[in-house]
Image (tube, rainbow, N blue to C red):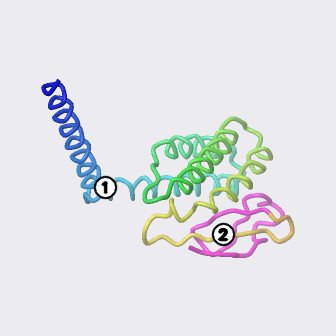
Amino acid sequence: MRKYTWAIIITIASLSFSVSAQVKTSAQEVATPELAQKREALKEAIVMNYLGIKNSLVKSDSLQAIKFAAEFASLLNQFKFKKLSLDEMNAATTTREEIKTLALAIAATKSINKQRSEMDKLSVKMWSVIERFKPEKTTLYKQVCPMTGTTWISDDKAIQNPYYPKNMLTCGEVKASI
């Protein structure tokens, strides 16, 4: 009986050592400059593809919007949220999935009007978590068309309305920046 007790104690001790070693390794990985650079590059790619969708809609180029939307959704799959509580993590993950679904809806149609409709919903959701995706040294602007209430995100204060570029290209205003 004593042998079994010692065997159990030794097994538990070795497991707890193994778990603490894994925790230390994970914490060390987060702090490496290489991983930080990789995460920053991913953020930049996510934002650039979102802006690619927006700019394609400004040009009324539905085929380019499809390409950017598909890449945007793919990049979102690679992004991992960091330093969040469990509730914040669940909310952010749900929002990311909603954004990905909207991006895939844009990628699934050649109809510029359907793409614009999905883009408005995508932009509202994206702004709600933008601080997680925004690359360092980048300023992003939440812009809104006051006539229609549609929202988009831009990296420039100048207004380029992706929803009505023929009639209301410069209709909009900056509502917030980050």
Residue 33 vs 114, above or below: the answer is below
Res 3 quadrant in image: top left
Secondary element at image label 1: helix
Give x and y (percent) for residue 123. Answer: 68, 57
For the record, the magenta segment spans 150-178
x and y percentages locating residue 85 in the rendered image: 49, 58
From the viewer's perspective, tell me whether residue 53 is left or right of residue 171.
left
Q: Is residue 81 magenta?
A: no
Residue 158 falls inside the magenta stretch = yes
> What is the quadrant of residue 67 in the picture?
top right
Residue matched to label 1: 30
Is disc 1 surrounded by few (<14), some (14 to 19) or many (20+) residues within 10 Å? Answer: few
Q: CA distance from mark 1 to mark 2?
A: 30 Å
In the figure, 59 relative to 98: above or below?
A: below
User: Mark 1 belongs to which amino acid?
Assistant: Val
Point out residue 49 in the picture as x, y percentages from the top left corner. 54, 52
Quarter of the figure with residue 150: bottom right
Q: Give the label, 1 or 2, closer to the camera.
A: 1
Query: What residue does disc 2 label?
Result: 142
